[in-house]
Image (cartoon, rainbow, N blue to C red):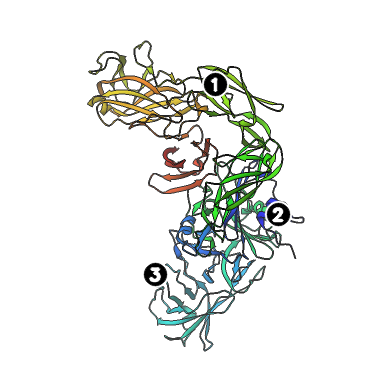
Amino acid sequence: MRKRFTLLASIAMGILAGQAAAPDWGVADTLEHYEIGPGIQYIKIRYESVPLTLWATTIDMTNPYNAIEQVQSNNAVPDLSRELVQDMSKRLTRPGHKVCAAFNHDFFSYDAGICIGLNASNGLISWSSGSGRSTFAITQDKTASVFFPVPQCSASLPTGESVAIDQFNWGIGYTNGDCVLFTNLNALTLDAEGRYIKLRPLGDWIINGEPTACEVLEVSDSPLQTSESDFVLFLRNTKRDALPGVAVGSEITISQKLIPGKFGTPPENILQAFHGYPSIAFEGKLHEGEYNDFENGREYELSCRTMAGMSQDGKTVYFVATELSENSVGINCIDIANWMLAHGAWNVVNFDSGGSTAIVVNHTMLNLPGRGSLRPVMDGVLVVSNAPEDSVVAHYTFSKSQLNVPIISLAPLTLMAQNQYKDIVERNVEGFTFRCEPAELGWVDDEAVFHAGETVMAGKIIAEKDGISAELPVSTRPVEGIHIAVDEVLIDSVRPYRINLEGSINGQVYTLDPAAFTWSSTNPSCCRIDEGVIKGLANGETTLTGTLGDLTVNLHVTVEVTPATLVHEDFADLTDYPLASTVANTLTLTHEGLPAGWSDGAVLRFDQKAGRNPYVELGKSYRLYSLPDSISLQINLSDEALAAIKHIRFDFTHQGGKNYWQPEYVPSHTGDQTITWAFAQEGGEYPIEDFPLTLQAIRLVLNAGSRSEVAIPLRDLRAYYPVKENSAVTTPVAESRFAWISTEGSPVLHYRLSRTGAADIALWTLDGRQLTAYTTTRELPGTYTYPLPDRFLTPGIYLVTIRANGQTQSLKFRVK
């Protein structure tokens, strides 16, 4: 008998001798690993060298408080509208029935509104014909098995009269079978010619167990309809008179049998059955004649996918899902099966792939959709906690089962609260006290960030709160390629700057702790450095040198002390001021005709002719001094100018010279008005590494048409600076901005965390349809990127929302 071995334990402990060889994907980085419900282990793994993101969920079926269920979309067969997996998760969660994880399941027919294989939920077959191959079944005693099913179902009277059931429910256009049992999932209005027998089940349903007795409520040659409580047995053609003795009040028993087919043995008392299409691995190895008989070579298709497996004793069930995105490649089902075999699975079947692939935890889809938009599916897999409701905290757990990090690195810690059954009652719990054993392992700061020590060693972090503790095993390892992420940095005299130090292990980049280094400065008068954090003192430049043993790193620092405000342009000197336009006959910038009360400034004048892409541009470039919070420009608009201007765009570049930000101001009234753009607000300041910023141009985008003598007065292009750390100028038109999208090549979302935390990111269509939802891991303060899946989106404009550090921002981007 082969030893039972859970998938997650094998990842941590290594591959058992004699098991299949896993694909050579390089080093696995475990991003998350914790129990999300009773006996339900969740893990997220990253193979950076592939690159591949993979989720594995392991269910210990010996735990009395969990269950695996097959569910139909919207509880309907057929169902042309289908349902998102996360919506199934929400809809079917109730007290005592908490959906901890959910997955997509069967391939399906868009036109017929049905799955393609045999499936059963809570002991009742929902659909029994089609392209069925293997079945992955869960029995009443919570044991998994895989087999080729041959349905043998019947309806019988006590007199011995019996008829074979050909089909359960119908799909659109699939009116097959002369004896059909329409269950409470039936969504059709029945109207075919034949004999109708309305039944009310008197007991529970089971497959390969005791038949279910049903009371006959009505017998008719006219159509009868199903309901939540009543089924309809439909007879026609050669079977119309197969039960001549049936009458109201009779008892009909329904027998659901699955007998042996090409492989495997159907067990007794099946509660849940999932069509597995081709069996990919059977009895510990690839299933010859099955895995390689998959739609003319589809077993080699590179895609994202969901697959299911089981241990040899059937008491452990595995679900594995992968992502297809800009940052995770497609994988074929053979490689996934070999990976699962190498990590403890015995039998493996294939669920739907591509755009249907979904892993949902806490009612949130974790993977990016494989074809760019969320795809409603025909059915799903629910992993359920049926433990009693209990909100009392009995355990705390880290989001990882162990932490393997470089020496002198920084690692944010995440903890969750669980009740006595291991259901999660709170995520991202705060307020712990921490200690490291041994103390040389490192220390944990007030933001729950672990600072690894300088010595390679093993130990543990202990977190305590309210008399309950959690332990996290830790191993620190040597680090390579230690360097500062930027060669030079501009700082002011207000905002402290933590040196961005990085290193790597096997190609994986880690953030390191600059406080581990001893620092010296060539010009101590312009800035000081304490525990790896720089604070500007006076204008000047210096080179900082950090030393750790034989290692040295260098950073060039420029300090520009902040004034309260600074006027970058007063328009006093208009000599050779660069102007451009696509539609102006005349275009000047003069001091004549300033509005009443203005003692300085300039007036932009032009005549507009008809033309495409009409605009007027002030092309003078301004390198903004130091690290401003915001800038402003005062304008005065007449009725004619207001009618001419569609919006005013400011083109900013960052210190690398690349396009950075193009905010647009849409004027709504005449007279004096001040345009203000904030670079920081509510603690969400721009990353210091991006400064200095340069305003490259101010473009007035015009409404189409012809106009004469348009005049637009302007004055005081002014920058504002913080008076204390993290302060920012705020005005009614200031834009709070901690996230932005770069559009050079594929669009990328950039976001800034002002403190340690996670970000919730969602992608929407403009009509409000959500396409993706994603929550990042807990990250250190800094700037991060999230590739937007534009190659899977149809052309158009989309909306991204991001929530982090108590702020929410919405941004638009275009897919061409």
Q: Is residue 770 above or below residue 701?
A: below
Task: Choose between 65 and 141: the one closer to the eye.
Answer: 65
The residue tagged 1 is: 527
Measured as percent of width and height from the top left, residue 393 is found at 53, 56
Q: Are marks 3 and 2 in contact (CB under 8 Å)?
A: no
As shown in the figure, which amino acid type bears the numbered disc 2? Ala
Mark 3–mark 1 Cα distance, whole angstroms, equals: 79 Å
Comes first in the chain, label 3 or label 1 = 3
As shown in the figure, which amino acid type bears the numbered disc 1? Cys
Measured as percent of width and height from the top left, residue 190 is found at 40, 72
Mark number for residue 558? none
Quadrant into which the C terminus falls: top left
Quadrant of residue 800 in the image? top left
The reply to whether residue 686 is visible in this rendering is: yes
Mark number for residue 342? 2
Comes first in the chain, label 2 or label 1 = 2
Q: Is residue 188 above or below residue 747?
A: below
Secondary structure under tag 1 reads: strand
Q: Is residue 241 above or below residue 533?
A: below
Local crowd size for mark 1, using a 10 Å CA cut-off: few (<14), some (14–19), many (≥20): many
The residue tagged 3 is: 189
Local crowd size for mark 2, using a 10 Å CA cut-off: few (<14), some (14–19), many (≥20): many
